[in-house]
Amino acid sequence: MTFRTRFAPSPTGPLHLGHAYSAILAHDMARATGGQFLLRIEDIDRSRARPEWEDLIYDDLEWLGLTWDGPVMRQSERLDSYCETLDALWARGLLYPCDCNRRDIAEAASAPQEGAPMLGPDGIVYPGTCRSKPRQPGQMTPRPSGALRLDMGQAGLAKGVYTPRLGAEGIASFEESGNGEHIRHGIVAFTPDEVSHEIGDVVIARRDMGTSYHLAVVLDDAAQGITDVVRGADLFEATRIHVILQRLLGLPTPRYHHHRLIRDQNGKRLAKRDDARAIRKYREEGHSPEDIRRMIGLPQA
């Protein structure tokens, strides 16, 4: 069995040790099976993406000794694909417009009748404020000015999303092989009720970029033929969203490997603002790619 993996950074800052861990792990998993390692630039956030950061991504990966197969995919060149998919989901009655801002959501979720706000992969679970607004059937013309949310209730009714099982609620599942914090290995199953209460109606297209991470990553992984998704444990819970979208769109579900997060001395996971651990800094200080592997606990190439 060969793996086809990918590394998908955003050009919004320098790569750090956590990125190195994810990229090297995905690269080595593919190469060990005689498979392919692909590169994707997630640049849909045009307000933050910068050409200089993209150039640095290439430089850092090459310095680490990582090579990728085929051309680089760039999300900014795939907007038509995202729009077509949104139109199709809208026509099926699976999306609705939402004008709520973060404050609106926090206040609605904190209302006395709601109890304590539930936190999901995208923050506070959306309380469904805009779900009952009238929806125009057919084509989405003109496109709503606000965000678009996926109606999880309607998605759960779509054929093929959940498989009935004897004496219990329908389930969906994915295969997990990661080693991240609190990760469940093997087949991870979930139900419509769990999705409704623990995730809610997620934003599937943001007003400022025309899509969202959830939609773009699902379409991109399918377009690149990814068999094994290697990414941080912080995205484990979001995988349920991605599996639902894959089922709705008739796309294959890859295997998932959610790995541990690289943290600083205080136990806080690294972020792009943590420039002190940027790969560029280690390069400038004279460290070698072997030093980086040793720092993040991976075997030498």
Image: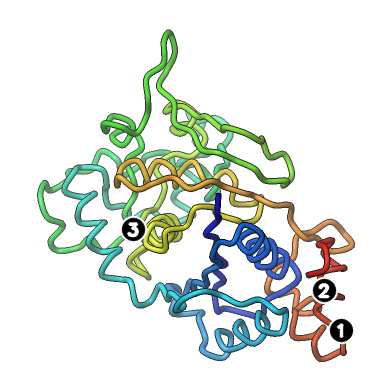
Q: Give the label, 3 or 2, closer to the camera.
A: 2
Task: Please report the residue visible at 65 percent of the width from the left and 67 percent of the height from the top.
Answer: 23
Q: In which quarter of the image is residue 208?
A: bottom left
Q: Where is residue 166 in the image (x, y as percent from the top left)?
A: 41, 10
List the residue tagged with mark 1: 287
Task: Please report the residue visible at 20 percent of the width from the left and 42 percent of the height from the top.
Answer: 93
List the residue tagged with mark 2: 292
Q: Where is residue 299 in the image (x, y as percent from the top left)?
A: 83, 63
Classify residue 162 as left or right of residue 266: left
Task: Please report the residue visible at 30 percent of the width from the left and 60 percent of the height from the top.
Answer: 146
Check disc 1 and report its element: helix, strand or loop: loop
Task: Compare residues 290 and 110 and report the one nearer the observer.
Answer: 290
Verify CB contact (< 8 Å) between mark 3 and mark 1.
no
Q: Which of marks 3 and 2 is nearer the N terminus?
A: 3
Residue 147 got which mark?
A: 3
- Structural crowding at the residue carrying mark 1, measured as other residues with C-alpha within 10 Å and reported as few (<14), some (14–19) or many (≥20): few
Verify CB contact (< 8 Å) between mark 2 and mark 1.
yes
Residue 191 got which mark?
A: none
Q: Which amino acid does the dot numbered 2 rest on?
A: Ile
Quadrant holding the C terminus: bottom right
Q: In which quarter of the image is residue 45?
A: bottom left
Q: Which amino acid does the dot numbered 1 rest on?
A: His
